[in-house]
Amino acid sequence: MNKQTTFFIKRAFDIAFAGTLILLISPLLLLVSLAIRLDSKGPIFYYSYRVGQNYKIFKFYKFRSMRTDADQLVDQMKHLNQYQAEDQKQLEEFELTRHTIAYHSDEPMVIKDTKYADVNRFEDHKSQDNSNSFVKFKNDPRITRVGRFIRNTSIDELPQLFNILKGDMSVVGNRPLPLYEAEKLTTDNRVGRFLGPAGLTGLWQVTERGKDNVDPENRVKLDIEYAKNYSLWMDLKILIKTPIAALQHENV
């Protein structure tokens, strides 16, 4: 079966699956909405801009599971990132003075505001930073009480059924990424993960989700594998495994 035929069958399945499921679980959607409203201040739904297939950017919907200032806290919590390399070092910077400008050797340097750094060390640091493309916190303090339950049971993902109806996503595919993560995966050996459809569940979710020792490189490899080889049969196998993977015990 060629990719075009697969696409049309996959799209028809997506519409039927998402539409039917929304009707069946509508009481649950209302109950969760009420619980979120009573648990903490803020909107019931949360959206962020995500990058999907062919680098398409769209609004990605979830039930709100975090504090309303969660996005602003990411920079303050980078040291807790589980994907962060254990041996990552800070870039060595020096004060930029007139003496430095006048007597610096011919070796190239990178200048930022009143600081400078050796260009080779800067490139090494940039490469090191790009290796940590994903962000994940264990026992994330930004999560609300209701939020922790709906995240551990993946109920917070249910509003993405509306993304599927709109055509932003498929039921099965690679997870659409936040802009700050996606921009780090545009190198030749990584950008292939964006050739596959964005999905509610996918190959990485049913094989690696919930593990303590997460590996960002392995996640990219799994995404590329799906993008190159996805088929209706592969989607069916992933769907069958998804309920078990969704009922995880780790706070992610």
Image (tube, rainbow, N blue to C red):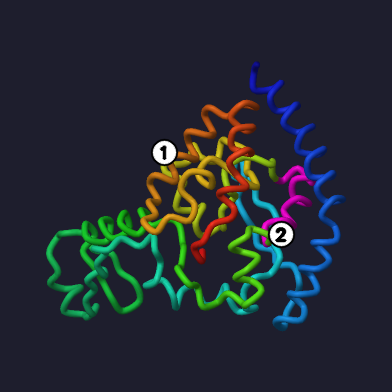
Instruction: Determine the secondary structure under disc 1.
Output: loop
Disc 2 and disc 1: Cα gap in Å? Answer: 29 Å
Q: Is residue 4 above or below residue 25?
A: above
Question: Dot 2, crowdedness within 10 Å: few (<14), some or many (≥20)?
Answer: many
The N terminus: image quadrant: top right
Q: Give the total number of marks visible in the rendering.
A: 2
Q: Is residue 5 above or below residue 176?
A: above
> Residue 105, how many percent across, how many down?
12, 64
Q: Magenta region: which residues?
A: 156-168
Residue 61: give its label.
2
Per the image, is 225 magenta? no
Residue 188: give its label.
1
Q: Is residue 188 above or below residue 35?
A: above
Q: Is residue 153 left or right of residue 183?
A: right
- Name which residue type carries label 2: Tyr
In which quadrant of the rendered view does residue 19 lie? top right
Residue 15: give its label.
none
Q: Is residue 117 left or right of residue 221?
A: left
Residue at x 45%, y 68% (from the top left corner): 138
Residue at x 45%, y 53% (from the top left corner): 184
- Name which residue type carries label 1: Asp
From the viewer's side, name the closer residue of 40 and 24: 24
